[in-house]
Image (tube, grey):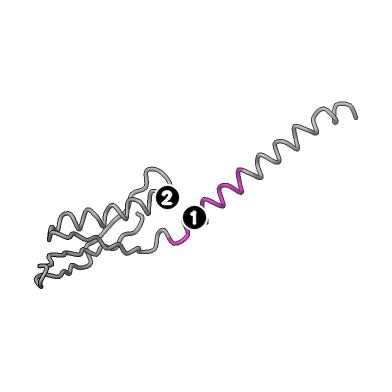
Amino acid sequence: MSRRLMQIAPWVVALGAVAFFVQTGIEARADNNVGARETQRFVGESDNGNFQAALEDALAQADAFYATMGADLRYNYRVRGTSGERGGFVFFNIVRVEIVASLQ
């Protein structure tokens, strides 16, 4: 019986270690998602007055933010506001689009 126990013991220890590291990894991934369901703010900008380009810039920022949390995540977004600058000596034509986003 003692010999059989000595043969099984390393496997039990190895499986226990694997279970520990898998659980720790899951908890670490969950910690990375803390605050992900909260609303996040992103501001895109276009130097040539193009609203679509500013919106796409804000969405690219949101994509990059949520991509760090895992694959195949889906988020909702809403345009919260727009602002801009126009005129002056160098003729500014800046458009900013602010969105708020959160995971579904």
- The residue lying toward the viewer, choosing from 1 and 35, is 35
- Mark 1 or mark 2, which has the lower sequence index? 1
**What's the residue type where badge 1 is placed?**
Asn
Q: Horizontal and vertical percent for residue 3?
A: 89, 26
**Residue range of the region highlighted in magenta in the rendering:** 22-35
Q: Is residue 63 left or right of residue 5?
A: left
Image quarter where the N terminus lies is: top right
Q: Is residue 90 left or right of residue 24?
A: left
Q: Quadrant of residue 16?
A: top right
Q: Is residue 42 left or right of residue 83?
A: right
Compared to residue 76, the image places residue 85 above or below, namely: below
Q: Quadrant of residue 20?
A: top right
Dot 1 corresponds to which residue?
Answer: 32
* Residue 62 marker: none
**Helix, strand or loop at mark 1:** helix
Q: Horizontal and vertical percent for residue 61?
A: 31, 55
Q: Quadrant of residue 13?
A: top right
x 35%, y 64%: residue: 39
x 78%, y 33%: residue: 10
Dot 2 corresponds to which residue?
Answer: 68
